[in-house]
Image: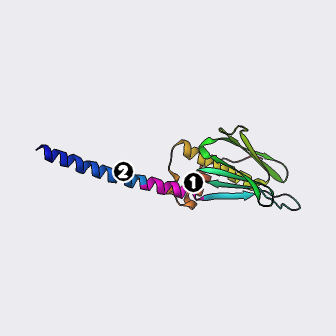
């Protein structure tokens, strides 16, 4: 009788281990999918020429800011969405400055100048939408890229007054 109980317990433990492994595989696949999808990418524009444009790449889990100073040299700042405390847009007649305020950096803000105003506002909307989804612990990897962008735009549809 005890052998039957032991065999049942072992079988249940194996089933739980297999189910846990499948869940782990799905989690890892979701994380990989999230980390490789760039939702938006914008670059700076300086007149008359911008030989070393800075770039902002918005991914599902983080924002990468690439600052270029010279040929083959750059600084890359990567900020997790959960660590962004604010995104500020400063506008002038033609361009905008985006300031990303991080909770983790010693110098807790990254400034990107000479962005087109409409692009800066759009990227800010996406980041704010991602912050909302992250705060509610919603898994974004289940959405296609198009669905996710549409949902993020809907989440942050407040009219921006300039």
Magenta stretch encompasses residue 92 = no
Most prominent secondary structure in the magenta stretch?
Answer: helix
1 left or right of 15 in image: left
Residue 26 % position (x, y): 43, 55
Magenta segment: 25-37
Q: Residue at 61% across / 48% down in the picture?
A: 129
Which quarter of the figure is the N terminus placed in?
top left
Residue topped by disc 1: 151
Label 1: how many residues lie within 10 Å, few (<14), some (14-19) or many (20+)? Answer: some
Residue 124 % position (x, y): 68, 49
* Count of numbered circles in the view: 2
Label 2: how many residues lie within 10 Å, few (<14), some (14-19) or many (20+)? Answer: few
6 left or right of 59 in image: left
Q: Residue at 36% across / 50% down in the picture?
A: 20
Give the numbered dot on residue 103: none
Q: Residue at 62% across / 58% down in the picture?
A: 38
Element carrying mark 2: helix
Q: CA distance from mark 1 to mark 2?
A: 30 Å
In the image, farthest residue toward the left: 1
In the image, farthest residue toward the right: 48
User: Are the residues flagged by discs 1 and 2 in contact, CB closer than 8 Å?
Assistant: no
Structure colour scheme: rainbow
Magenta stretch encompasses residue 28 = yes
Residue 32 % position (x, y): 52, 57
From what the image shows, is residue 49 above or below residue 84? below
Front residue (pair 125, 42): 42
Sequence-wise, which precedes: disc 1 or disc 2? Answer: 2
Residue 16 % position (x, y): 31, 49
Residue 41 appears in the picture as rendered: yes
Element carrying mark 1: helix
Residue topped by disc 2: 20
């Amino acid at each position: 009788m005890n052998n039957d109980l032991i065999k049942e317990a072992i079988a249940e433990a194996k089933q739980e281990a297999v189910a846990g492994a499948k869940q782990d595989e799905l989690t890892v696949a979701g994380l990989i999918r999230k980390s490789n999808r760039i939702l938006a990418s914008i670059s700076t524009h300086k007149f008359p020429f911008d030989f070393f444009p800075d770039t902002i790449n918005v991914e599902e889990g983080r924002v990468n800011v690439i600052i270029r100073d010279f040929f083959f040299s750059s600084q890359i700042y990567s900020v997790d969405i959960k660590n962004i405390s604010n995104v500020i847009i400063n506008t002038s007649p033609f361009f905008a400055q985006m300031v990303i305020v991080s909770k983790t950096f010693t110098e807790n803000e990254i400034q990107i100048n000479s962005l087109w105003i409409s692009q800066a506002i759009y990227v800010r909307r996406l980041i704010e939408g991602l912050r909302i989804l992250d705060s509610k612990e919603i898994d974004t990897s289940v959405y296609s890229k198009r669905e996710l962008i549409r949902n993020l735009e809907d989440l942050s549809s407040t009219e921006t007054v300039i």
